[in-house]
Image (tube, rainbow, N blue to C red):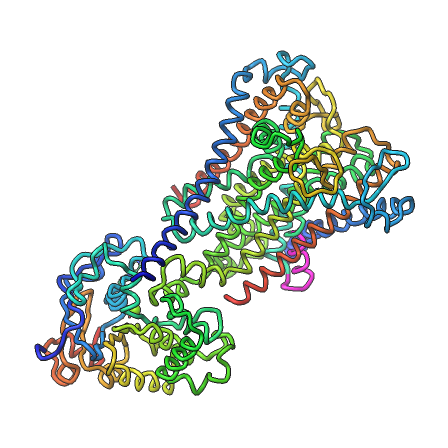
Amino acid sequence: MNLQEKRRRKDQLFAVICLASTITGILLLALLLCDIFVKGFSWLSWDFICSYPSRFPERAGIKSAFWGSIWLILLTAAIALPMGVSAAIYLEEYAPRSRLTKIIEINIFNLAGVPSVVYGILGLALFVRGLSLGKSLIAGALTLSLLVLPIIIISTKEALSAVPNSLREASYGLGASRWQTIRYQILPSAMPWILTGSILALSRAIGETAPLIMIGALTFVAFTPQTPLDPFTAMPIQIFNWISRPQPEFANIASAAIIVLLLVLLTMNAAAIILRRKYQKKLQGQ
Amino acid sequence: MAVHSYNNIKEKIIERYLFVCALISIFVTISIVLVLLSETVSFFRDVSIIEFLTGTRWAPTYTPSHFGVLPLINGTLLIAIGSSIIALPVGLTSAIYLSEYANEQTRGIVKPVIEMLAGIPTVVYGCFAVLFVTPIIRKLVPETEIFNAASACIVVGIMILPMVSSLSEDAIRSVPHTLREGAYALGATKYEVTTRVVLPSALSGILASFILAISRAIGETMAVTLAAGATPNITLNIFESIQTMTAYIVQVSLGDTPAGSIAYKSIFAIGMVLFLMTFGMNLISQWIRSRYQEVYE
Amino acid sequence: MNHEEIEISVKNFNLWYADNQALKNINLDIPRRKITALIGPSGCGKTSFIRCLNRMNDLIPTVRTEGEMLLNNENINHKDVDVVSLRKKVGMVFQKPNPFPSSVFENVAYGPRIHGEKNKQQLAQIVEESLKNAALWDEVSDRIDRSALSLSGGQQQRLCIARTLAVQPDIILLDEPCSALDPISTSKIEDLMVKLKEQYTIIIVTHNMQQAARVSDYTAFFLHGKIIEFDETKKLFKKPKEKSTEDYITGRFG
Ligand SMILES: Nc1ncnc2c1ncn2[C@@H]1O[C@H](COP(=O)(O)OP(=O)(O)OP(=O)(O)O)[C@@H](O)[C@H]1O
Ligand SMILES: [Mg+2]
């Protein structure tokens, strides 16, 4: 039974390796979060959130970056969500199974994998220079919209295709038109997942740095923007700025800003989960 | 009847509007290509394409300037390969753990946690590299430069790990259960079932996930900008500073480069190379995946 | 029944899927080198039962079992049993053919290989013999390196049988092996079983009464997770003791 023993050993070793890999991933996440928290936590204060950036570490804050990010994400949502959801509805519910449709779908999938810095170049040429929007919030939001559009389309499409066909048939069977079926049956039952996907896409946008650097958002901004045409800074940009400075205090400030950024992300994700739960309950008539 | 035609018009308008939205993706792709192409063409009026593709020095701001892209490609590939060496094996084995070993409960907890790694902004990974990974490497290997490829490889590896893990797991799970049962019934151990039946059947899906992850590593920007430095170098030494294509693009746009200057145009040429590389890899990954789906449908 | 050698002896066996009990107090002695047929209406627990005999149910997390299944005086339902060597002894052919997506040769060679056969000639010989025993050799000998997925359903099923034979088990479990097959393939597999029982103990689940009557030596009738009747096939089909058995085999059931 020597062979038997050897096979058993191999089997056990393999299981251990697989488990170890998985634990490695989790440990790395824990390590990263711990490191950031240890460095940044003591710098976190109300003042930090309510002050503008400064050359002096003890006076630096992220007020302008925080509000810049909020503006950016709201504008991006306003631009990208209607467009992305509409495109997905067309592709899933209307489009004929033609070559063009197939090409569009493959293309969208590939666009989701194009590096964000390339979107930055596009934004620079198209919005900052082409439309002469300058280094404004709206130029940033348009750039980020292009970036998240494919992600929103893909997740919405998935949500729509998960709606059972029997629902469509039932609605058509009652004489409803296509749009009525979509509007009153399909969209409501896909909504929880559309919402989740969209929020996840937007949380990708809020962490993006490279495209914003490309359109020139890395400037000293000591005010909160009032209109979409104002120049701006955003949290990831501010973090990049601080971490690139030589003084060690700024590294800790960057960590503090990362904590704020991660908290915003966490809030968005929690919101996605809560919204989905609520919607699902409503759908089930509870 | 009147109501009817009003409804018909409304339906038509809605469909048209939705169609236009769907076309936007094509528009985005075309405009990426056009924007990149126009400046790239004008870049190649000043710089010979031969020098660009075969030159071994990248020194755009020197006089005389040099525009050989090979050092940047070298840097990019060094990061891509280094991070893959970390992420592919770890990602794949954790995918195997999640799909073949873990029970539903464990999987329900572990999978989202690993996916959280994917949701962390890349600039955060950059900070982690600078503040945590680099000091450790420098302690272990004292001759390491402050900016070095090793640190970037590690964090980019962590960054693409969830992608490998999650996409490979999908591929592995979609292998029909009856195949596993067939092998178990012959007295195979879990290791044998996994390596000789499940993995070969999921191979194309796994490959597709690998290619996608490598393409992501190639396009990764902030972590390499922060950790790997800005020294275009042809080297395989991961303890030296290098520069990737993405980091160069960021470096140029950090300075105040006037539009129309040769440095400004060069980012479009580099962007073009980057776009072609990643778009091509994504296409290949898609193609492999679609072939694979046909087998099991 | 006491003149038969017993291969597996099942005692007070129960099985639950979560809270749903699918097998209730099963007692059954399965004779050696005979064909035992399991019959009964859909959902009565036949599949659940034979999957216990080589512990395939371990792969379903919700399953819980209780009771004894003695093979060579060893309880195969004990948690310390090495399921890998158990499954080498107790082979299984599934309802739907499930060949691995590799060549015909690789499919059959897989089992011997994992159990330590390295010699190429030896492997080739095992493969040929198994395919011959499964009455498939004549049809595939010229395309043994082609993908197994290119075979017809009936050929795939016989390939799965060959794959099981190549491991040289003592017992072969067949779960409705002919349900997806045409009459010609079916009769080939029936002939095969009769041939195989000289060397193997065979347990077959079937919905086809003629098939059970034709090939099996013993028959067990399952209903609602219980064994209602177990006897020599001839007796059971000629003169069933229980009313429900009679109803079922004459097609008056339900
Ligand atoms: N994986 C499972 N999870 C939960 N319940 C199951 C599972 N498999 C079977 N059951 C239940 O156990 C009972 C017995 O099922 P089993 O598959 O053993 O029946 P069967 O006699 O093989 O039926 P058939 O002739 O249709 O194949 C059924 O009530 C079924 O619903
Ligand atoms: Mg069954």
Q: Is residue A132 above or below residue B46?
A: above
Residue A167 percent location from the top left of the image: 48, 56
Relative depth, front residue between C46 and B281: B281
Considering the whole magenta stretch, tell me its main secondary structure: helix
Task: Report the quarter where the C terminus of chain A lies.
Answer: top left
Does the magenta run of residues contain A101? Answer: yes
Quarter holding ligand 2: bottom left
Relative depth, front residue between A141 and B287: B287
Residue B159 percent location from the top left of the image: 57, 40
Does the magenta run of residues contain C164? Answer: no
For the point 51% across and 52% down, the residue is: B168
Residue B236 percent location from the top left of the image: 68, 43
Task: Report the quarter where the N terminus of chain A lies.
Answer: bottom left
The quadrant where residue C107 appears: bottom left
Q: Is residue A229 above or below residue A275?
A: above
**Magenta stretch bounds:** A96-108
Q: Quick check: B88 left or right of B113? A: right
